[in-house]
Amino acid sequence: MKFRKSMVVGLVLLLVVTLTACAAGPNAAANQPGPEGQVAGFWLGLWHGFISFFTFIISLFNDNVSVYEVHNNGGWYNFGFILGVSMFFGGSGNRTRYVRRR
């Protein structure tokens, strides 16, 4: 029993280390203006998040289209992006209230 418990702990630690190795590093282009001379903020992040599904599909066929703007202001752009993605994909959680009626 003790061997099994230590095996589970070891596998969990291995999984945690593996997943943290996949974490993104710092963005070198943050707070740097892009080719248009602008830094993307919250509102542009919200828009990019909302259209992310379509830009992903287009980016598969066109190398000039990317899903995420790297020339952003950091946290506010990320917050807007995540909020836009959740708005598009219905992240309100209203389906959790669904009650099956007989």
Image (cartoon, grey):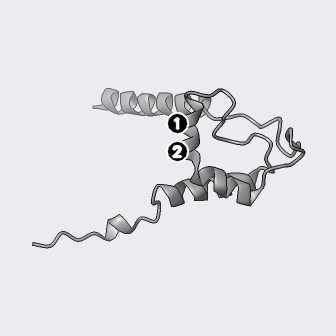
In the image, residue 34 lies at what x, y percent?
A: 85, 40
Position of 47 relative to 1 (above/below): below
Give me the disc on residue 7. none
Q: What amino acid type should be assigned to the residue bearing mark 2?
A: Phe
Secondary structure state at the residue bearing disc 1 = helix
Quarter the C terminus occupies: bottom left
Query: Whole-percent x and y of residue 31?
Result: 86, 46
Identify the residue position indicated by label 1 in the image.
57
Residue that label 2 marks = 53
How busy is the neighbourhood of tag 1: few (under 14 within 10 Å), some, or many (20 plus)? few
Q: 10 Å neighbourhood of mark 2: few (<14), some, or many (≥20)? A: some
**In the rendered image, the vertical position of residue 73 relative to residue 68, given as above or below:** below
Real-space CA distance between mark 1 and mark 2, rounded to the nearest whole angstrom: 6 Å
Left or right of 49: which side holds 43?
right
* Residue sitting at x 32%, y 71%: 97
61 sits left or right of 6 in the view: right
Q: At 78% from the left edge and 55% from the top edge, which residue is drawn? A: 41
Viewer-side residue, 56 vs 95: 56
Residue pictured at 83% horizontal, 37% vertical: 29
Which amino acid does the dot numbered 1 rest on?
Ile
Q: Are marks 1 and 2 in contact (CB under 8 Å)?
A: yes
- x%, y% of residue 33? 88, 43
Pick the quarter of the image with the N terminus.
top left
Q: Secondary structure at mark 2?
A: helix
Q: Position of residue 57 (x, y in %)?
A: 52, 36
68 or 15, which lies in front? 68
Left-right relation of 71 to 83: right
